[in-house]
């Protein structure tokens, strides 16, 4: 018990405690047991321009004007990479021309720094390729289970961005990915 009263012993204990605290911060192992469920409705576009009073919204479209509808541009099914991942990804063009990535029935592990990326890399069984080429980050993963929408910038070239990945930025790994076709 003299070891715990000796300055070297106290330094070893302090260093060990600091190492454990740093490892807990870095790896956040409790996230293996947490679930964040999100259930956003499919994206829609308001008929009124922002700031317009609701009385300015026509109640009916003229019969000669074709109704614009949401169009699916691409879709794909998630495959598992570093963590079991299932669900589908859909790239949608809304009636106003804006584009949205919709993740449906997503089920993956929670993680310390998960992002949603569109990538120019093909989806294979290898997860490490997604940070090799071009990618576009759409934001933090809103939830590791459920349905969520992510706005795609107007200048994004969907002709080259052919896959979506759930990317762990902290450890540079793909949890899962879907080829968009």
Image (cartoon, rainbow, N blue to C red):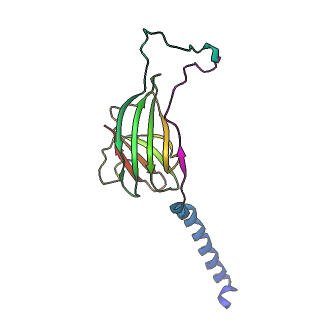
Residue 36 in the magenta stretch? The answer is yes
Task: Estimate the x, y position of residue 143 in percent, counting from the top left.
Answer: 52, 48
Quadrant in the picture for residue 88: top left
Question: Residue at image x 50%, y 41%?
Answer: 148
Does the image show residue 49?
Answer: yes
Quadrant where the C terminus lies? top left
Residue 89 sits in quarter: top left
Extreme residue toward the bottom, this view: 1
Q: Is residue 17 left or right of residue 66?
A: right
Residue 62 x %, y %: 48, 9
On screen, 49 above or below 113?
above
Q: Position of residue 79 (x, y in %)?
A: 35, 51
Quadrant location of the N terminus in the rendered image: bottom right
User: Where is residue 60 shown, x and y percent of the image?
Assistant: 52, 14
Report the predominant secondary structure element of the magenta stretch.
loop
In this view, 147 is above or below 94:
below
From the viewer's perspective, is 140 left or right of 78? right
Query: In terms of depth relative to the viewer, which is nearer, 145 or 153?
Result: 145
Q: Residue at x 60, y 67 (%)?
A: 21
Q: Which residues are magenta?
A: 34-53
Is residue 123 part of the magenta span, yes or no? no
Can residue 161 be seen at all in this image of the molecule?
no
């Amino acid at each position: 018990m003299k070891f715990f009263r000796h300055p070297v012993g106290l330094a070893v204990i302090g260093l060990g405690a600091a190492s454990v605290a740093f490892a807990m911060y870095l790896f956040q192992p409790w996230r293996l047991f947490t679930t964040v469920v999100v259930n956003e409705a499919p994206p829609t576009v308001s008929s009124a321009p922002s700031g317009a009073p609701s009385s300015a919204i026509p109640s009916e479209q003229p019969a000669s004007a074709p109704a614009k509808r949401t169009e699916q541009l691409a879709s794909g099914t998630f495959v598992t990479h570093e963590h079991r991942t299932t669900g589908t990804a859909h790239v949608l063009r809304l009636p106003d021309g804006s584009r949205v990535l919709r993740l449906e029935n997503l089920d993956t592990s929670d993680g310390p720094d998960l992002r949603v990326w569109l990538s120019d890399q093909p989806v294979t069984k290898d997860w490490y390729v997604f940070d090799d080429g071009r990618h576009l980050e759409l934001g933090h993963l809103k939830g590791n289970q459920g349905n969520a929408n992510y706005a795609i910038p107007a200048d994004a070239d969907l002709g080259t961005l052919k896959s979506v990945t759930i990317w762990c930025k902290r450890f540079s790994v793909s949890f899962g990915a879907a080829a968009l076709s």
